[in-house]
Image: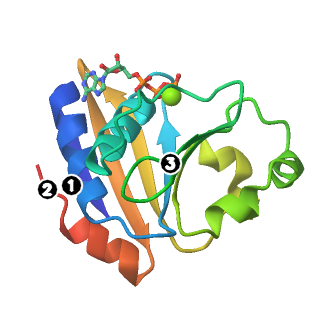
Amino acid sequence: MKVFFLKDENFTYKIGKQIGQKLFPGAVICLNGDLGAGKTTITKSIAKELGIEEDITSPTFTIVNEYMDGKYPLYHFDVYRIGSSEEMYDIGFDEYVYSDGVSIIEWSNLIEDILPKERLDILITYEGEGRNISIVPYGDKYEEILEGVSL
Ligand SMILES: Nc1ncnc2c1ncn2[C@@H]1O[C@H](COP(=O)(O)OP(=O)(O)OP(=O)(O)O)[C@@H](O)[C@H]1O
Ligand SMILES: [Mg+2]
């Protein structure tokens, strides 16, 4: 696990960029934390690093947004309004998560029972004017991603 204090948005971007650089097909990133803490912000940074030029907006009402113009397909989920994990199967969650794309899931704790075991867990919380971020890797490939992350 690594924990950092992110003084402002630029630091959130920096961490996202470092993660984005080390992603691989099929990578899964889970984002949790306070409302408005920066989950979508870090997603934007990762997307930029994948070469996605389209603007990343929160998929709150659609559950998932797909971006196909980068190095790998990016599937950006926001499951904040999901009622149950079963609803995720209806939108084809497994097809996304076990594909060659990169999946980023905001509020993943709400569907904890169906998340893949191997993934990168990120928690972002308020700390004064800034944020605390803690990053936990599950699996060798995710440990490797984390090795490339520093402030
Ligand atoms: N390290 C930081 N310090 C201070 N402000 C930050 C930091 N990182 C991001 N922000 C700001 O916090 C806000 C985060 O908004 P964002 O939409 O990314 O949050 P979110 O976690 O996705 O919210 P939601 O819970 O609604 O999905 C943005 O205004 C961003 O500029
Ligand atoms: Mg968001």
- Rounded to the nearest angstrom, the CA distance separating label 2 from label 3 is 28 Å
- Rounded to the nearest angstrom, the CA distance separating label 1 from label 3 is 21 Å
- Residue that mark 1 sits on: 18
Q: Seen in the image, is 103 located left or right of residue 144?
A: right
| x 81%, y 48%: residue | 91
Which quadrant of the structure image shows residue 37?
Answer: top left
Mark 1: few/some/many CA within 10 Å (<14, 14-19, 20+): many
- Rounded to the nearest angstrom, the CA distance separating label 1 from label 2 is 8 Å
Q: Is residue 1 above or below residue 126?
A: below
Q: Is residue 109 above or below residue 44?
A: below
| x 33%, y 46%: residue | 46
Residue 97: image x %, image y %? Answer: 63, 63
Q: Seen in the image, is 91 located left or right of residue 21?
A: right
Residue 68: image x %, image y %? Answer: 50, 48
Q: Seen in the image, is 103 located left or right of residue 110?
A: left
Residue 62: image x %, image y %? Answer: 71, 30
Q: Nearer the viewer, residue 133 or 70?
A: 70
Badge nearest the viewer, 2 or 3: 3
Numbered tag placed on residue 150 in the rendering: 2
Question: Label 3 near label 2: C-beta < 8 Å?
Answer: no
Numbered tag placed on residue 68 in the rendering: 3
Query: Which amino acid does the dot numbered 2 rest on?
Result: Ser
| x 32%, y 51%: residue | 50
Badge nearest the viewer, 1 or 3: 3
| x 34%, y 35%: residue | 53
Badge nearest the viewer, 1 or 2: 1
Mark 1 secondary-structure assignment? helix
First reached walking from the N terminus: tag 1 or tag 2: 1
Mark 2 secondary-structure assignment? loop
Query: Which amino acid does the dot numbered 1 rest on?
Result: Gln
First reached walking from the N terminus: tag 1 or tag 3: 1
Question: Label 2 near label 1: C-beta < 8 Å?
Answer: yes
